[in-house]
Image (cartoon, grey):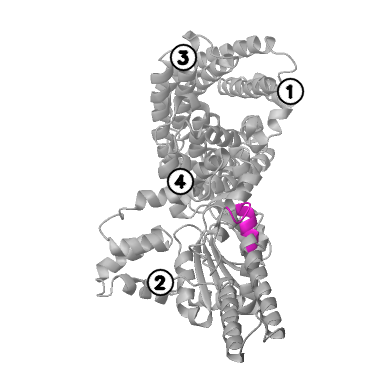
Amino acid sequence: MSKEKEYRQELLEWKWEQLRLRKKYCQTPAGFFSSEMEKQAVHQWKQEVAEFRESHRHVLESAEIALDEPFAGREAELKLIREHLENQPLPVVLYGIGGIGKSALAREYIRRYQKSYQHVLYLSFRTTIEELILDDFHIPISNLHYDVNKYESKRKYFLVKYNILQKIAGNAKILFVIDNCNVRQDRDLPRLFSLPCHILVTSRRTPVIWGACLGIHIKELSLQEDWNDFIRCYQPDGITPEERKQIEDYRKKIQGHTLLMQQKLLHPEGDFSGVAEFKKDLFRKIPLSREERQAMLYLSIMPVQGIPKELFLTVSEISEQTINHLRGISLIQWVYSGKWQDKMLFLHPIIAWAAQDIFQPSTVNCRRLIRGFGAYLNGNGNDENCTWGRTWLENQRLEPYVFAFIKAFPKPAPWLAEAFDELITFLWIQGYYQEAERYSKMLFACVKEYYGENHQITGQMALRLGAIYHNRQAYEKSKPWYVQGLHILETCKPFNQVHLLHLVSAYHKMARFLWHRGDLTHAKEHIENALKALEIFRTGLTEEQKDLLLMHDRSRAYVLLEKGRILLQAGDLSAAEQICRQLFRECTQVLRTRFRINEFINFYIKILIEKKEYQKALKNAGQNVKRALFYRGREFKDTLHSKKQYADILFLMGRTAEAQKIYEEIIEDYPLCSILENSHIHGYAKIDPGNL
């Protein structure tokens, strides 16, 4: 109790005692001389008491709320809010992304039902619950205001005002509407939510972390009639069919974002003047940590269907705690995908649009994500998990993410060349040769400009570009890139320890090209150079360098395979057979990889054909076809070659009708096939198996 209150109470009590004594000792100088005199004194005392009580009576004074605005739809949500508030002793929280219509819905609820309340308070949350309650302008209570001389601190005044507010709410029907309450935690939130009145909150935060409340997720308008009403609200004179189509297209693009739809109707010619401020506001209301901003930046470049949670966590190195927090503030959404057996993380198009505009994705600020995704495609050095090791269908699931990276970074960064090359490799493995060629040429130009013409990475990227032409069977187009790559790697200064392996690759690719052209003499020279370079590389390795040892073993297996092919083509069946046995004896780790074994089996089948062991060759060729279809799909070069080899064996066995049917399939799947040009059988190309 305040000193003023104590003084006035004591004074009134003292006056009452004086009245009692004067009545008792009437007819004395100190008493009343008449009953009229007594009545006047008592009346005056009662007036003073009434004034005292009035000055200490606390009444909530509702402020005037301006609510005149257009509104359409949301009938189901309004009904749900009413049911919850009337039947549940818990606050109702309307949550969702910024600009989706939460505040407008809360104001519409006030318009509909304010007559059923004695008091309605519409409050805008700023910093804390304490600051909200302390605001005497927006929560005015008669005979109560903050006085620094009267209260020791604001906290003490808050507790006094809260207790008074609690008593008032217990005796009157009150609606508290708290707009934009985006706080994560607040020590006074339980106090606020325990007030005996109806509480309606709007927030961008998922209210599950607040405990005792009921959440209603506010999304875009779902019913077409609601959209029709919405359009009429802002275009009462109607719109033309062409304008309606434009608006419907825009609505699909932004997934029905309410604020932007409203502004599009008001400003059909372009963005409304406050669009830049709106974008900033989406992230300003709730401060984000550096990692949270990074997560939003990364997700903003992902495809609209989102990205599997585990995949994103793997390639981005973003923590799961960060993802959960961003989902809690309605910036990230997720939905379960049976295809991925995981939750798909995605951003509302407006959030993604704002994140891209504000955070400006680039190869610099997204370098960790680019490297992470490149490493994922590469399997982090594990053949079983790389693009080659995944099935065609498994890779197909990753296609949207590869194209999302290429779209986000139309010009690759040279210092991320290996990561970008993984994207390119993925493209041509999946049959996107034109896209791979275009992007690879751009990457080579960037690398050449950045590192110079005579650098290991420049030579490496030249070889990679040649590989695209080789795998689309445009062998002559691959030659200049192989020649250029080999020249650079032979003359440049080594950039790192794997320089020799890239040189081995260059020798190998040139040998393979020459083998295709039938120049076996020069092909042998290049393959011997590759073997010598491998031997030098191996002598410089220690047993602890397991990754480099695996790279050596893989390169050696393919070089030996190429040597065997050359020997077989040269007619040295015995030497080729010896190479084949050596491969299957020494290169078990490489051959254990799910798909890579196909090339080695293909070579083994050629030996069986030369030995006229057709039945055994046919069985292995059939397995090769199944593996190729499973891992590379119908149209990839390796599938084509496997089917062609199988058909050739059938032809050699005299089963020409079966062979012809497969040749027809090959031409249908790969109409520009270059391996079916040398000779013909029943109108379909047939080539000697040794030339495959």
> In this rendering, would 515 be left or right of 388?
left
Identify residue type, mark 3: His
Question: Does dot 4 land on a helix, a strand or a loop?
Answer: helix
Is residue 164 part of the magenta span, yes or no? no
Image quadrant where one finds the N terminus: bottom right
Q: Earlier in the sequence, mark 3 or mark 2?
A: 2
Q: In this view, does 453 lie above or below 246?
A: above
Task: State how far apart marks 1 and 2 are (Cα).
Answer: 81 Å
Q: What stretch is highlighted in magenta?
A: 149-160
Question: Does dot 3 land on a helix, a strand or a loop?
Answer: loop
Q: Mark 4 points at which residue?
A: 355
Q: Which of marks 1 and 2 is nearer the N terminus?
A: 2
> In this rendering, would 297 be left or right of 391?
left
Identify residue type, mark 1: Glu
Q: Mark 2 points at which residue?
A: 67
Q: Residue at x 47, y 15 (%)?
A: 486
Identify residue type, mark 4: Ala
Q: Which residue is drawn at 26% across and 74% down?
A: 238
Question: Does dot 2 land on a helix, a strand or a loop?
Answer: loop
Question: Does dot 1 land on a helix, a strand or a loop?
Answer: helix
Q: Name the residue under label 3.
A: 455
